[in-house]
Image (spheres, grey):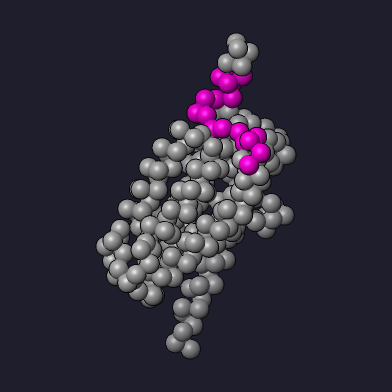
Amino acid sequence: MGNLPVILLYIIFAVIPYLVAGINPAIVMSKLIYHEDIREKGSGNPGFTNFKRVYGNKFAWYVFILDISKGVLLCLFSAFAFKAVNGQFHLGASYAGFFAMLGHSYPVWYKFKGGKGFLVACSAIWFMDWRVALVAMCIFLILLFTVKYMSLCTMIAAWLCPVMIAFPFGTYCPITAEAFDAEHIAMICVCALSCALMTWRHKENIKRLAAGTESKFSLKSKKAKDTEAENN
């Protein structure tokens, strides 16, 4: 009976992040503004990158902000709830982050056809360890503006997170300057599971990368790129 609050905690912060994160801004905005379904356009992925490619910059950054915001709020709420019940702030953030990714990727609201969860995952890692998040973000941006393959940069930056948190797989982590404990180990496992989910969601991108047909990321708007193409 004494474990009931902890059990409820895990149930609540599996269900709520899944359901809330399942509400996809790209799908909602494509239907409300353009009367189309973003899942039927471009790559078919209802996320920031595909929305930007299809519709341009005008509303794409709203998708970006809303995806980040829902992840931040869910992870923060869960982190403080876990801290209040069992003192595990970081595990609470990673736990909610995983189920938010699951909801974003396989939303019950849209027949389980959703996005890839990268922006939601970005929200979670900052609450797990801001130092790891900062390093991962810097590496991501460097790769994005050199390699320019969003999918590849996303997966590399994602997998760096559990590695940086755990390296060198001993009793002490030099990057986070903390001794390993049950929460730390659980957090690494949840983080790795989130990365595995993200990689699975990028399986089509991996095929296109291997075939050399993956689209490159650009900050230019759709209109600017179309004008540039016409002038060339």
Left or right, 5 with respect to 102, comes to left
Q: Residue at x 37, y 61 (%)?
A: 167
Residue 21 occupies quadrant: bottom right
Q: Nearer the viewer, residue 224 or 147?
A: 147
Residue 44 in picture, x, y percent from top left: 68, 41
Q: Residue at x 54, y 33 (%)?
A: 217
What residue occupies the far left of the structure in this picture? Answer: 177
Please indicate, yes or no, whether residue 96 appears anywhere in the rendered image.
no
Specify start and end residues of the magenta stretch as a single range: 210-226
Left or right, 64 with respect to 125, comes to right
Q: Nearer the viewer, residue 106 or 188?
A: 188
What residue occupies the far top of the structure in this picture? Answer: 231
Q: With respect to residue 24, does 53 lie above or below?
A: above
Residue 185 in picture, x, y percent from top left: 41, 70
Q: Nearer the viewer, residue 191 or 14?
A: 191
What residue occupies the far bottom of the structure in this picture? Answer: 1
Image quarter where the C terminus lies is top right
Q: With respect to residue 62, does 87 lie above or below?
A: below
Q: Nearer the viewer, residue 95 or 193?
A: 193
Residue 138 occupies quadrant: top left
Tell me, yes or no, whether the highlighted magenta stretch contains residue 222: yes
Q: Residue at x 69, y 55 (%)?
A: 112
Residue 59 in picture, x, y percent from top left: 55, 32
Left or right, 36 with respect to 82, comes to right
Tell me, yes or no, whether the highlighted magenta stretch contains residue 230: no
Q: Residue at x 63, y 42 (%)?
A: 210
Please indicate, yes or no, whether residue 132 appears anywhere in the rendered image.
yes
Residue 4 in picture, x, y percent from top left: 49, 83
Q: How many marks?
A: 0
